[in-house]
Image: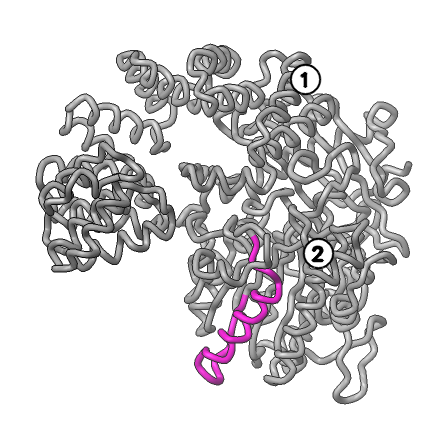
């Protein structure tokens, strides 16, 4: 394996005099771009497909799929053969893509406990300032606005609750089907101001687990469901591109097509993504089609085309990063590239087809550290400075046991050559560490964010395990090597899947196996304790959560869970002490503040409890538990207007939350808003017909509205469900119902 003359990023070729042979093509590309700056495209369309491997597309050599639309786009685009995601996870990868900055700069290192800081601009903000109409349509709530990516977008469609009716039958409300994304996108284009250029980002989530493509694609790809999801997405893109052509926008728009990361599919023992940084999960497709009304068309060889022809710049072999895309799109739109962006502007290559200057490509995953307490990974892909006919590059992975791969001769990364090439690996390690030092900000961005119960549940339903690892995303090589734990991680993923399906016996069997091998495994203990809690075996849950604290004393959730269990067992002092410890450990987490506040309210310490709940709300204004508890406290103090406002906010955040509805109905009764009580309780009964309190409140409101027959029926139903319901008993007695008339 040749390890000589690797790119240093200096712009000169080692061992030669003068400028390298990339200088003349770069100058030509510069002149082309200078001429193009006087014009601007009609629009810029950014398409990101979640979890899409480049090697599962026809244009990248795959023969078992069906991607004619994407393959046709590749023929009209600059196709980057070797594009890489900086992180193999949806949120941090998109944060890097949309800001043109590395994860250690923008601070978004993992998901879901991170949020893009407000002081890191997005590419949409630059387009908006340049007069573009801006919008995004998301395929999944994993990128909802609470993660900070919505800045600069006039319309950021993450409204998944409203789109429930669009979901495929049986598909959980975690995916918006590709066809729906396209329909919403075309509707937005029709509604934007006529003649105004646009920047539109479309995020498609279909190839992500669970793989459940619509009927014909599911049956055609029954043995390859991942390919079925890709084929379905391709068919939706055909509708999108046809819509653009019919509106005269396809040729005159810049179109960038890529993915946020790939999928393990069993390579290196990884079924999903996020755990390793091999090419199976970080190599992504990247196609960039320039606008025909801005850039003169060129063939792959650089020759000009006949009038009206549209083709791409050809195949670009140089390694590039998704961090390079934001500056490239701005340049292609004639917008100055801000100096704060750290990516390389590839617009010259998109226009001319010439290879860009080779530059180091960085990748990392903090997932093993933050979720499992194991070692994080980071890598540098370095390429020969001279451009040979065949692409040649090496990848160095920094880990407790480092790895070195010749990506040209070993694209599957199955031969770790570190032990036999340590002399060649040492400069790459130094280059990697120098690269990080050169790009890390003087003051790191504060990107950690609280994780609500709803968000944790969402990510768990997508197959991600919880965060039970280290508290901070710092790099080290002193922890367990992920290579040694991949089998254990796969077991945890299976246990998490069974847990989400409420198959607690199956989950317990897997967790027992994990804990036999690794008795201190924090995630296994966390899941195991939660299963005992859900089974109401509080004594056993307490014992397991105590073990969890011993195994992971840095894990705030362990203290919260044990505190909650102790409080339910009547050990309220101990519960309070554990909650306070969790608050000390993670002041940015609203959950221990909320739990402690609710505990104090139950003890009658209203002022202290309300103060803690208000602090929780500052961290998470949509925390329905805090809003509901504060509403209850205000009602207890007969501050009914305040109570109504708090409970209305809770209901807006969680329209189907029955306890919130019942509390709000009670408050409305005190305020004399009887018509609203009737409406609210009828809706609540539709959600859960077993709620005796809903019938009782409906009965009281019906009496006040003069609907006595309806009131009698409501009280009867309430008492049939709960013969001891105080409100229903009082109402029935007030109406003079005989004991025989009451069930």
Real-space Cα distance between discs 2 and 1?
A: 33 Å
Disc 2 residue crowd, few under 14, some 14–19, many 20+, Cα 10 Å: many
Q: Position of residue 87 (x, y in %)?
A: 62, 42
Q: State the image coordinates of residue 684 (x, y, percent, origin top left).
A: 32, 50
Disc on res. 513: 1
Left or right: where 278 falls relative to 156: right
> Which residue is disc 2 drawn over?
229
Task: Say which quadrant the N terminus sits in.
Answer: top right
Query: How is this picture coloured?
Result: one colour
- Chain part drawn in magenta: 175-200
Circle 1 SS class: helix
Percent x, y for residue 177? 60, 60
The question of residue 195 being in magenta is answered with: yes
| Along the viewing direction, whichever of 625 and 308 lies nearer the viewer | 625
Tell me the quarter of the image containing the C terminus: top left
Q: Secondary structure at mark 2?
A: helix
Q: Nearer the viewer, residue 515 or 331?
A: 515
- Which residue corresponds to the image point at 81% horizontal and 44% vertical from the top-left? 393
Residue at 51% from the left image edge and 56% from the top image edge: 339
Q: Tell which residue pokes out farthest to the bottom in this image.
A: 307
* Residue drawn where x is 43% and y is 60% of the image: 162
């Amino acid at each position: 394996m040749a390890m000589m003359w690797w790119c240093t990023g200096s712009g000169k070729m080692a061992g030669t005099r003068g400028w390298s042979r990339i200088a003349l093509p770069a100058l030509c590309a510069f002149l082309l771009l200078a001429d193009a700056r006087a014009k601007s495209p009609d629009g810029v369309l950014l398409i990101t497909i979640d979890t899409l491997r480049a090697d599962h597309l026809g244009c990248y050599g795959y023969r078992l799929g069906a991607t004619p639309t994407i393959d046709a786009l590749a023929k009209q685009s600059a196709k980057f053969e070797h594009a890489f995601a900086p992180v193999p996870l949806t949120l941090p990868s998109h944060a890097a893509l949309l800001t043109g900055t590395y994860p250690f700069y923008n601070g978004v290192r993992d998901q879901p406990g991170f949020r893009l800081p407000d002081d890191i601009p997005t590419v949409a903000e630059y387009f908006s300032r340049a007069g573009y109409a801006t919008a995004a349509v998301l395929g999944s709530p994993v990128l909802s606005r609470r993660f900070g990516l919505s800045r600069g977008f006039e319309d950021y469609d993450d409204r998944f609750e409203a789109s429930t009716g669009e979901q495929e039958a049986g598909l959980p409300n975690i995916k918006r089907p590709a066809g729906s994304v396209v329909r919403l996108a075309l509707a937005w284009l029709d509604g934007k101001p006529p003649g105004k250029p646009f920047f539109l980002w479309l995020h498609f989530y279909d190839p992500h687990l669970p793989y459940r493509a619509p009927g014909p694609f599911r049956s055609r790809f029954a043995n390859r469901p991942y390919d079925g999801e890709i084929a379905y997405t391709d068919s939706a893109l055909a509708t999108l591109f046809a819509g653009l052509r019919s509106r005269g926008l396809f040729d005159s728009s810049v179109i960038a097509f890529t993915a946020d990361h790939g999928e393990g599919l069993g390579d290196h023992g990884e079924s999903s993504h996020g755990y390793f940084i091999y090419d199976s999960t970080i190599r992504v497709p990247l196609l960039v089609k320039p606008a025909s009304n801005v850039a003169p068309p060129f063939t792959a060889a650089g020759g000009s085309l006949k009038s009206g022809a549209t083709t791409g710049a050809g195949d670009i072999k140089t390694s590039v990063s998704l961090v390079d895309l934001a500056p490239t799109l701005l340049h292609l739109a004639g917008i100055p590239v801000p100096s704060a962006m750290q990516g390389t502007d590839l617009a010259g290559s998109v226009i001319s087809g010439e290879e860009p200057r080779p530059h180091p490509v960085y990748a990392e995953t903090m997932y093993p550290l933050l979720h499992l307490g194991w070692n994080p990974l980071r890598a540098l892909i370095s390429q020969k400075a001279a451009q040979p006919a065949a692409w040649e590059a090496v990848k160095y992975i920094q880990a407790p046991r480092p790895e070195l791969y010749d990506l040209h001769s070993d694209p599957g990364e199955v031969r770790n050559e570190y032990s036999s090439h340590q002399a060649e690996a040492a400069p790459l390690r130094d280059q990697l560490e120098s690269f990080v030092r050169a790009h890390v900000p003087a003051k790191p961005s504060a990107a950690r964010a609280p994780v609500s119960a709803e968000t944790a549940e969402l990510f768990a339903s997508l197959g991600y395990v919880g965060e039970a690892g280290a508290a901070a995303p710092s790099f080290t090589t002193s922890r367990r090597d992920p290579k040694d734990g991949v089998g254990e991680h796969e077991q945890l993923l299976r246990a998490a899947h069974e847990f989400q399906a409420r198959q607690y016996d199956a989950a317990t069997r897997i967790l027992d196996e994990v804990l036999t091998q690794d008795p201190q495994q924090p995630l296994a203990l966390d899941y195991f304790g939660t299963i005992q809690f859900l089974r109401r075996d509080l004594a056993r849950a307490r014992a397991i959560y105590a073990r969890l604290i011993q195994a992971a004393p840095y894990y705030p959730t362990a203290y919260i869970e044990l505190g909650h269990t102790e409080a339910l067992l009547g050990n309220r002092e101990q519960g309070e002490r554990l909650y306070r410890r969790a608050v000390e450990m993670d002041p940015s987490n609203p959950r221990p503040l909320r739990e402690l506040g609710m505990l104090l309210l139950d003890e009658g310490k209203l002022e202290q409890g309300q103060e803690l709940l208000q602090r929780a709300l500052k961290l998470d204004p949509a925390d329905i538990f805090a809003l509901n508890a504060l509403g209850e406290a205000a009602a207890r103090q007969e501050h009914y207007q305040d109570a109504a406002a708090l409970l209305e906010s809770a209901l807006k955040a969680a329209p189907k939350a029955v306890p919130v509805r019942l509390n709000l109905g009670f408050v409305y009764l005190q305020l004399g808003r009887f018509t609203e009580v009737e409406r609210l309780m009828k809706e609540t009964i539709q959600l859960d017909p077993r709620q005796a309190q809903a019938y009782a409140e409906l009965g009281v409101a019906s009496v006040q509205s003069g609907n006595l027959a309806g009131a009698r029926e409501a009280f009867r139903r309430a008492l049939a469900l709960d013969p001891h319901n105080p409100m229903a008993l009082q109402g029935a007695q007030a109406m003079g119902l005989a004991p025989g008339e009451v069930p």
